Amino acid sequence: MKSKLLLIAVLLTAGKAMAQQKHTISGTIKSKAKGETLIGATVRVSGGGGTTTNEYGFYSITLTDGNHKLEFSSMGLQTNHLEFVLRKDTVVNISLEDESVSLGAVTITGTSTKRSLSTPQMGLEKLTTKEMKNVPVLLGERDAIKVIQLLPGIKSAGDGNAGMYVRGGAADQNLILLDEAPVYNASHLLGFFSTFNSDAIKDIAVYKGGMPAQYGGRLSSVLDIKMNDGNNQDFGVSGGVGLISAKLNVEGPIQKDKSSFLVTGRRTYADMFLKLSSDSSLNKNTLYFYDINAKMNYELGEKDKLYLSGYFGKDKLGVGDLFGLQWGNTTATLRWNHIFNNKLFSNTSLIYSNYDYTISINSGSVNADIYSKIRDYNLKEELQWYPSSSHNIRFGINSIYHTITPGQVTTSETSQINARTLEDRYSWENALYVTDNWKMSDKLSATYGLRVSAFSVLGKGDFFNIDKEGKILDTLHYKSGDFVKTYVNLEPRLALSYKLNSTSSLKASYVRNTQNLHLISNSTTSSPTDKWVASTNIIKPEISDQYSIGYYKDLFGGDYELTVETYYKSLQNQIDYRDGADVNTVSNAIESELLFGKGRAYGIEWLFKKRVGKFSGWLSYTLSKTERQIDGINNNKWYNARQDRTHDIAIVAMYQVSKKWTLSANWIYYTGDAVTYPSGKYQIDGQTVYYFTGRNTYRMPNYHRLDLGATLQLKKRKRWSSELAFSLYNAYGRENAYTITFEDSKEDPNKTVAKQTALFKFIPSISYNFKF
Amino acid sequence: MTMRNSFIYTILGAALLLGTSCEKEIDLNLNGNDNKLVIEAVLTDTKGDCVVKLSRTKDFAADNSFAGVSGAKVQIYHNGDTTLLTETSTGVYVAPELSGTSGNTYGLLVTLGNEQYTATSYMPSKVPMDSLSIVEEDLFGDITKVANVSFKDPAGETNYYRFQQFIRGTKVKRYYVRNDDLTNGNDINTRLYILGEDDDDHEYDINSGDEITVEMLNIDAAVYKYFFSLSSSATGESESATPANPVSNISGNAIGYFSAQTVERKTIKVP
């Protein structure tokens, strides 16, 4: 009902605007050098007004007839000006030239890198390639996800942990999309690297609040990553060799101007070093990953374009012959862009994503493989309609069919383990949304919309009724195709911006998100074997309501930006574990190990950024609190969520010394995570064990670290350019705690001690990158 | 558990290889304990094994000598037959003539001052140990001798097992528990690995000529849950995100367990 009213309101306002004598300018904006379509490129109309390109480079703007000056601009590219008399609907396709073509040179970009003061979108962070390139990272492997974690409100889960925490959300509450396909495990090598090869990435946007209605399914954030389309002008090769990994990127036109391809691959070779080790406990071990990104696009005609993109990655870890673990993501996206007319743009996507892992155990007479996966088939249809210069409307549907295989145990003939397959779990997730970007006046804009989500738990399978203690009361059997339960949720989205003056604005937003896939991991460290579980009759959809307000100010002529955002989130149906929970044992009724309750998170985030010039960088500070209240934990009182961190600071600085050298540094500091330590001890069967008085009542030691980086541009020859990148991770050798364990002292068995293990002290690295 | 351990060791191994992993003792400001009563109560199918030990929790920083709690009245009962245990040393209560029978449920009643603590435990059927042997296995690159227990799991019932290992007369400080969830009705070889020892620590090395003793216990579901949760979340190894006191079968303001269990011991000389 609500949605109908909204749509009618939208149509009415749109109709009114069209009654005047106006015409539409539309087209695609691309980069001249590579023919890549540009996302978020700006079209500005002199005398006020403007628009930005969508995720396929398409724009449409409707203006009154007459003389107009248009300005087309995009980050790192030369701005184009166009002056003409508008009398009829016109298609204007624009190609923008590079400001700088070399790989190493830092591009000092124009005005378009500025975050926008007038769009209502808040809680959005975008990364430039420059930031991605120059921030020093572990082992020299450039990683967008690691750089994102230096922004306020987005926190790394710590050394050796894959996850990230956004505004108090847990690691599984981030929707990570690669060309629209959900990625269920975004890490390689236990979180030391992300699955995203920065060479293949065109655009990254992180929404930590105010998510537009086209996104849904996770509570805390959306990380929307788009791959490069591939150069449709020239054939090009680039690559890099580092201490532990090498990569290669090949792209080029299939048909000049019309179609292109891109293939990017990476492989680590850390395991080769393992083999060189004389330590017999290491040299038989395996530890590597590889991944491939591939994409091609084809222009069917002026109005139709096809894109096919895919990702395939695999990690392998082995301890001699004893134990093996491999895991990986596969995604594929087929998209069809169709321009119905100069005001209506359509995209249809068919998406496949899959995450699976296999554990192999081969010890004595225990021989078994355990296989688990989550797989999605996903259909999306979205229409973007530009009825007038003050409205930009999107509506769409999304339908995903999930299959989760929780665990298949296969064994050899001689194994003493019995083969067993846990029932596959099926679910169907549907969403319908509409959202409108409405420019009410020069000062006031709004984005408002509604997402209706429906999540159906499907048979076949056994579901349970359990009591308060987690005991199974009865088992309900469902046949294939039965609807076990359907959860329907209305998710309103609203964002407002008010421009105070030419250099500052205020924004406010409210967003409701729901989540029906939950990651079960009762461990201090994230593991590829953590389980994805869909909502059931007992596990209810997680719901979050987030309110936020922000203040945005440009300082010193726009060279500096100040952003202050504050948020309050209230969460329902949050999940935690019973004392002594066993979530790894192969069993159908995982619910009996879980407890459900509510949560709240609030905080304030400051970001002070210098965008342009030889010296650039930012200072970010977050003050926040994240709590849970779950009956059965800590006497039903509010307690700190694990990811609760009071203070979180990041300082990032980049300095272009000369044409050849760029230096960079970043320093981070955060309050240790909330953890459970023992408060006492006792003995059971002569062995010291520990006595606990509450969950998450203690803190890990505070974390801090300085990283340094330098990039040296080597001599250029014709098309060939190359650079050397140096980095020093953890420059002052801070021993940050990875785990803290408790044991009887080796020196004096009559004492117990707390022992901290840190993963890294200093890690220097060097890598060589080239391009031709 | 083994799986998870290997995983962590590999990460640490990789970090070690980079020459960067480091360990140190740290000081943590830990709150006081509640001076809680700890009950360890065992009744087996063998006379002389029935022991109930009472002690209390201590502060983390205190030493590891745990004084017994004396002056309690400790009773074990079954179908109206009640046996009063006698305190032979501080906090140790025994009933030398008392043994249990498979299929029976036993009750424990501890009275200390004005407080009462109760528990019940079912003595399951006894699964015989077929043999105890020593096997050699390549563990993280070292050929290691490991104790191996063979038995046949009965198909018709759910069984829970616990093992205790003694090397040269010293009890190994590890909890070994298993169920037959994935192994029901099979011939089982269970290996009692001793993981997590430092390279220079030889206390638990098994060498030729050593005497190895293994006790195989059949326990009930609640005691299995107790030892499973104890070993996964209370031994200080900190892999669990939610370390907690193990799930106890004792009611009243005490921690610990009461197990009515069968026991079979075998001793071999390492070849």
Image (tube, rainbow, N blue to C red):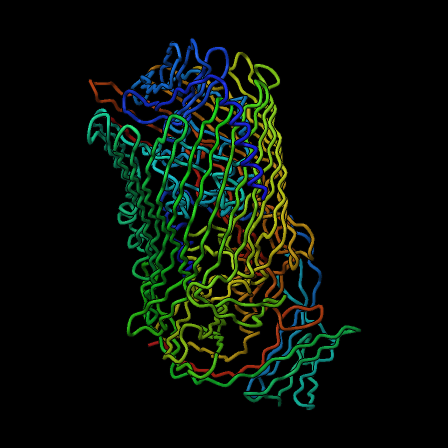
Residues A531 and A306: in front is: A306
The x and y percentages for residue A449 are 54, 36
Q: Is residue A134 visible?
A: no
Residue at the location (64% across, 48% down)?
B29
- Specify the quadrant that holds the C terminus of chain A: top left
Residues A282 and A60: in front is: A60
Instruction: Tell me where residue B90 sits by quadrant.
Output: bottom right
Q: Is residue A175 left or right of residue A546?
A: left
Residue A288 against residue B243 in the figure, above or below: above
Residue farthest toward the right in the current orientation of the protein? B114
Residues B116 and B96: in front is: B116
Residue B232 against residue A253 in the figure, above or below: below
- Specify the quadrant that holds the N terminus of chain A: top right
Residue at the location (43% across, 32% down)?
A384
The x and y percentages for residue A99 are 34, 16
Q: Is residue A519 visible?
A: yes
Residue at the location (67% across, 63% down)?
B57
Instruction: Tell me where residue B78 sits by quadrant.
Output: bottom right
